[in-house]
Image: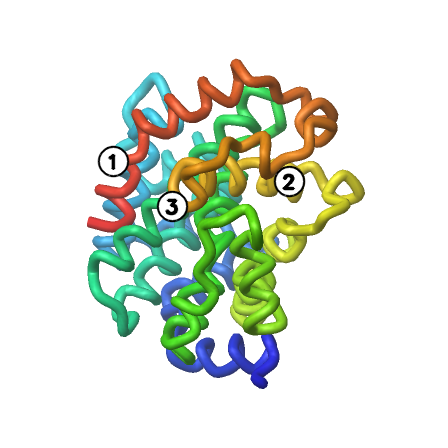
């Protein structure tokens, strides 16, 4: 049986982040780099620049003025947030040629965007600093599914579960010996992305989630709400999330309902930019 490391290593040779991404990452990691240096690399890729500006001007950020240049996006949103948008863009593009039908990929990205919007809403509502950064955790949380789909597509249906008898992530471990979330984290590690992304994604399905970071806890909650809406539809989220987890995070039923409404409103706009 292949290990999670072997899956991630194999697919990292197929689904690669482009040279433009590597250059942007290099500049961001270099303290001597300026906003103009980073902007100059982004604007060379018109599709990337257009995507960043569309998202920067969307209701997702709710900025009162117009952001019409990459330099202004970097100034207003911050380098870290623009970097997260760059990661989102290049990740989606890396998997564009996945050997799966369009309906499957559309469903995959819809669920990923839902999770991203939910976690971002909770972060904003709970006054977590730079809550928009949480969006990228939700968006990338299940990339491991596409890794498995690429290497061993026959296992995707085997890993499928829409029952409380065995939850999807437990079914994945039973079949593969690891979850899609753990595989996602391993791929991000291969891509040398920040541990601030890798850690919460790796820990998203821990039973003792209260022992982990706030980001991991919020991803745990957002993922399960998304699953109750889109995967395990016959159960409510409270069957998937212990009440004490929600209490510790100060998340109540009213806030969850608001998050679901927000997700329904914003979904199509985000999908139209990231997965046109």
Q: To which quarter of the image does residue 185 belong? A: bottom right
The structure residue drawn at horizontal position 62% and vertical position 72%, both measured from the top left corner, is: 177
Q: Is residue 201 above or below residue 71?
A: below
Nearest the viewer among 114 and 80 is: 114
Q: Who's the residue at 41% across and 68% down the image?
A: 156
> Residue 180 appears at what percent x and percent y?
53, 62
Give the Cα separation between the discs numbered 2 and 3: 19 Å
Can see residue 74? no
Q: Which residue is mark 2?
A: 215
Question: Which of the marked residues, 2 or 3, is nearer the chain's N terminus?
Answer: 3
Check the image and report above or below for 94 versus 13.
above
Please give left or right for residue 248 compared with residue 218 in the image. right
Residue 111 — which label?
A: 3
Label whose residue precedes the other's in the sequence (3 or 1): 3
At a point 55% along the width and 62% down the height, the residue shown is 171
Left or right, residue 235 beside residue 39:
right
**Left or right: 27, with 53 as reference point:** right
Closer-to-camera residue (8/80)? 8
Provide residue 47's location: percent of width, then percent of height. 22, 54
The residue positioned 46% from the left and 42% from the top of the image is 227
Residue sitting farthest toward the front: 165
């Amino acid at each position: 049986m292949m290990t999670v490391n072997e899956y991630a290593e194999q697919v990292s040779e197929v689904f690669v982040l482009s040279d433009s991404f590597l250059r942007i990452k290099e500049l961001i990691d270099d303290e001597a780099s300026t906003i103009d240096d980073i902007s100059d690399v982004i604007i060379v890729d018109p599709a990337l620049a257009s995507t960043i500006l569309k998202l920067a001007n969307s209701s997702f950020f709710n900025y009162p003025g117009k952001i019409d240049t990459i330099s202004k996006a970097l100034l207003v949103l911050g380098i870290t947030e623009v970097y997260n948008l760059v990661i989102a863009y290049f990740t989606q593009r890396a998997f564009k040629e996945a050997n799966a039908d369009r309906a499957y990929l559309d469903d995959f990205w819809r669920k990923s965007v839902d999770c991203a919007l939910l976690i971002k809403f909770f972060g904003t509502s709970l006054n977590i600093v730079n809550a928009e950064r949480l969006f990228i955790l939700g968006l990338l949380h299940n990339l491991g599914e596409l890794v498995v789909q690429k290497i061993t597509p026959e296992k995707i249906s085997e890993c499928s579960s829409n029952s409380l008898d065995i939850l999807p992530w437990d079914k994945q471990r039973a079949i593969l010996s690891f979850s899609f979330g753990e595989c996602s984290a391993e791929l991000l590690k291969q891509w040398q992305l920040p541990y601030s992304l890798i850690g919460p994604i790796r820990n998203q399905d821990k039973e003792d989630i209260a022992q982990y970071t706030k980001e991991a806890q919020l991803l745990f909650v957002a993922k399960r709400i998304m699953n109750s809406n889109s995967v395990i539809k016959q159960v409510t989220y409270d069957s998937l999330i212990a009440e004490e987890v929600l209490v510790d995070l100060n998340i109540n039923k009213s806030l969850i309902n608001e998050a679901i409404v927000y997700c329904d409103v914003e979904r199509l706009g985000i999908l139209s930019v990231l997965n046109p």
